[in-house]
Every structure is written in C-alpha cells, then in structure tokens.
Amino acid sequence: MMKAILVLALVASAFSAPQPRKDFHEHVQEFIDIIMEDAGHDLEHLLEHYEEFDEFWVAVNYMRTNNFKDIVYEMESLPEFVAVIDFLENDNIDVHYFLDLFNDLLVITESSKKSKQTRHTLSGRDFTSFVKDSISEFPKAKLAALFDQKMNEDEAFRVAIENLQSDEWDQVFGALWDSPVFQAEVKTLSENGIEISVLLDELKAIFGQ
C-alpha cells in the first residue's frame, strides 16, 4: 500500500537552552503528518480504486524497474543536475531524502482487504489522474496555515523557501530542465505514465501552496 500519499515526488535536510534547529525533512514530515491525519483514509480508498485500472499500473510497474532507478544515477554526472544539488545543499536540503521518501511511498502492495465503503469521483484511470485526485484530498487550509507559521517563526525554513523562490533558483533549475539529457529522461517518464510537472505540483501542494 502506498501509505496513502505520494509525493513526490522527484525533488533531506534544510530546513531553548535553545531548541536545536530542525532539519528540513523534519519540517516536511510535519506537513505529511497533517495529510495522513486528515486525509489518510481517503487517500487509501482512492488508491484502492486506482489499483483496479491497468493504466495506473503502467506507471507503478515502471517505477519498480531498474530503468527507473537508474535515472537518478545517470543524472549524477550531469553538470546541471550537480548544480541543482549544490544549490539545495547550501540550504541543507538533501535531495536524497526526498528520493528515499518517494521510493518508500511507492511501496504499493495488493491488499486482501479492499474497503470500498467510501466511493470517490475519479478524474481518470492513470497515475497522473491519481496524483491530481490525491492533491484534491489534501487539507490545504491546514497545510497553508502551517506553512505561514513556519515562514514567520523559523528563519532557516523561511530562508530556504525564499531561496527556492529566487531568480537564482529559477536559473539553476531552468538550466537542468532545458538540458537535452534531462528532457530525454522527462520524455521517457512521460511515455511510461509519469508526468514530472504533476509531481512538482504535488510537492507544492504538500506545503499547502
């Protein structure tokens, strides 16, 4: 089972006596905990519906292959990817945390107990539709409130987020996005039912944005 929530996922640490500063992944876990508490059951039921569709399993099965796992390793030699990693690490954001989280949340297993008491209106039958429908279940108001609280009260979190909203980040990530090698990987993922843009939307949605 997917433990009810995806991420994102493709893009772990940034973000008294004084309290020790939280790593970024600890902040992220707080947002995920809210999602699980408020929408976990609905997301599990949503997953169960999508498990019935062959289109959904095209992407899931691909994500279990070595070809999918090799994508990240292939990126490590790409200068534009290295620049992205260096930028994130300047704010103590470890991208490998998010990749590990993504892999953990992709542990989808067949369940012998299919509870269909709750029916959902589905937007489609494939993985992209599942991600979009999952986002719609997120408790956006609570997530946004926590995001605003952290922006006001935690300087390290605020600086990391502001850096991710900066022109410099746009240039660094834009260079990666425009790379022919990266675009080839994006195309491969898309051909196997995985849309990077939708996963990025989900990452923003985790923060209530």
Image: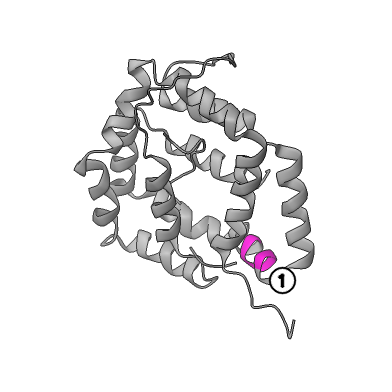
> Would residue 168 be visible to someone looking at this image?
no
Q: Quadrant of residue 134?
A: top right
Q: Is residue 32 above or below residue 61?
A: below
Q: Point out residue 99 in the picture as x, y percentages from the top left corner.
A: 40, 53
Q: Is residue 49 above or below residue 88?
A: above
Most frequent secondary structure within the magenta stretch: helix
50, 82: nearer the viewer: 50
Q: Quadrant of residue 186?
A: top left
51, 128: nearer the viewer: 51
Q: Was residue 158 drawn as part of the magenta stretch in this picture?
A: yes
Q: Is residue 21 above or below residue 180?
A: below
Q: Is 21 displayed left or right of 72 in the figure?
A: right
Q: Which residue occupies 63% across, 34% down?
A: 39
Q: Is 141 displayed left or right of 163 in the figure?
A: right
**Residue sitting farthest toward the bottom:** 17
Q: Point out residue 128 in the picture as x, y percentages from the top left corner.
A: 45, 27
Q: Is 140 displayed left or right of 124 in the figure?
A: right
Instruction: Provide the secondary structure element on which disc 1 rests.
Output: helix
> Would residue 182 be visible to someone looking at this image?
yes
Give, as a three-letter code, the residue at label 1. Answer: Glu
Q: Which residue occupies 21% across, 42% down?
A: 67
**Residue sitting farthest toward the left:** 66
Q: Point out residue 86 in the picture as x, y percentages from the top left corner.
A: 43, 69
Q: Quadrant of residue 28?
A: bottom right
Question: Which residues lie in the magenta part?
Answer: 157-161
Q: Which residue occupies 36% across, 39% down?
A: 107
* Count of numbered circles on the image: 1
Q: Which residue is mark 1?
A: 155
**Residue sitting farthest toward the front:** 113
Crowding near pointer 1: few (<14 within 10 Å), some, many (20+)?
few
Q: Point out residue 109 in the picture as x, y percentages from the top left corner.
A: 35, 32
